[in-house]
Amino acid sequence: MSVRRKACYIALMAWALFVSGCSTGRMICGFALKPGAIMQSLENTRSGMDRRFPGVMEWYDSLRNEGVFRDTMIVKEGGVRLHAVYAGCENAGGTAIIIHGYISNHISMLHLARMYRDSIGFNVLLPDLQYHGLSGGRYAQMGWNDRLDIKRWVAVAHELWNDDFMLVCGVSMGAATTMMLSGEPDLPDYLRAFVEDCGYTSVWDELEDIRSRTSFTEKNLEKASEFCARKYGWDFREASSVNQVAKCDRPMLFIHGSSDDVVPSRFVYECYEAKTLGYKEIWVAPNTVKHTYSFKDHPDEYLAHVRGFIEKARHFHQ
């Protein structure tokens, strides 16, 4: 069972134990957006990466010791500090901003950082989303407000390397963040493409899929969404990858495991069909059941699809 799937079921068990009466919506929202007890620490993430991708931590630590990987911070409105690590690449052909998933952090994306930097020849920047890793923030943004933070990181990366070809890519919640960003107005011309790997169609759809395996009702989820709107200023349906992708006219590659055990594979087809503007590709990794395992199960094919997509995306200009 994947770490994400375990986290979902632990949260669901917590809901079942603690949620009651009229507080159901508040509690569901609280456990979804503030999953503190199941957040992955940097050390736990390092250990997991060593098991899944032997050698990747040694690669990262070596580059950190050489001063290639560095830390940086930005401060957003309200004083929230956002953290990222970044590494340049000699004679880089572009820049990739690589976004992690729910309850995780930048360490979990090092396998893709190595692919983009060493195999494709890109500079890389790996942010920690709010409430994750070394970033501040009081709750998870589920990709919705994260899209605006990533827009800030896009500008930071451009200041670092002044590239005219940048792409944003993400996995799981990071993929949803990527799609949610893709439909924003006034994106810079140098942000040329997007790669999403196993993202959800909306926060509502993802939580509804989880809810369907519990005794909670759709009304309970409605109450949670209403509470989120009152307390945090956005609701679960508003946080929609599908709606944002429909406004995206820049190239996008959609990736998903064929039988994803956490984010249903049907979501990728809905997102793909929603994008009617501009160039798009889709790759559904065969015989991939574990969430976020498309690269793990098919590293060579994954690289080939991303590399081929980038070459096509270079021909599309804003």
Image: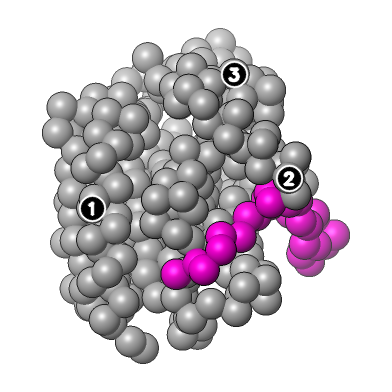
In the rendered structure, are the residues bearing label 3 and label 2 in contact, judged by CB atoms less than 8 Å apart?
Answer: no
- Which badge, 1 or 2, comes first in the chain's sequence? 2
SS of the residue under disc 1:
helix
- Neighbour class for label 1 at 10 Å: few (<14), some, many (≥20)? some
Q: Observer-nearest residue: 157 or 7?
A: 157
SS of the residue under disc 3:
helix
| Residue 104 drawn above or below residue 115 | above
Q: In the image as oriented, which residue stretches furthest toward the bottom?
A: 318
Residue 307 position in % (x across, y down): 29, 58
**How many angstroms separate mark 3 from mark 2 (CA)?**
22 Å
- Residue 243's image quarter? bottom left
**Amino acid found under the numbered disc labelled 3:** Ser
Q: Observer-nearest residue: 247 or 91?
A: 91
**Amino acid found under the numbered disc labelled 1:** His
Q: Is residue 219 visible?
A: no
Mark 1 highlights which residue?
Answer: 305
Looking at the rendering, the stretch of residues picked out in magenta corresponds to: 68-93
SS of the residue under disc 2:
loop
- Residue 123's image quarter? bottom right
| Residue 167 drawn above or below residue 188 | above
Residue 27 position in % (x across, y down): 60, 29
Q: Is residue 73 magenta?
A: yes
Camera-near label (3 vs 2) is: 2
Residue 64 position in % (x across, y down): 71, 42
Locate the N terminus by quadrant.
top left
In the rendered structure, are the residues bearing label 1 and label 3 in contact, judged by CB atoms less than 8 Å apart?
Answer: no
Residue depicted at 69% across the width and 51% down the height: 68
Residue depicted at 58% across the width and 35% down the height: 59
Residue depicted at 68% across the width and 23% down the height: 43
| Residue 120 drawn above or below residue 111 | below
Mark 2 highlights which residue?
Answer: 66
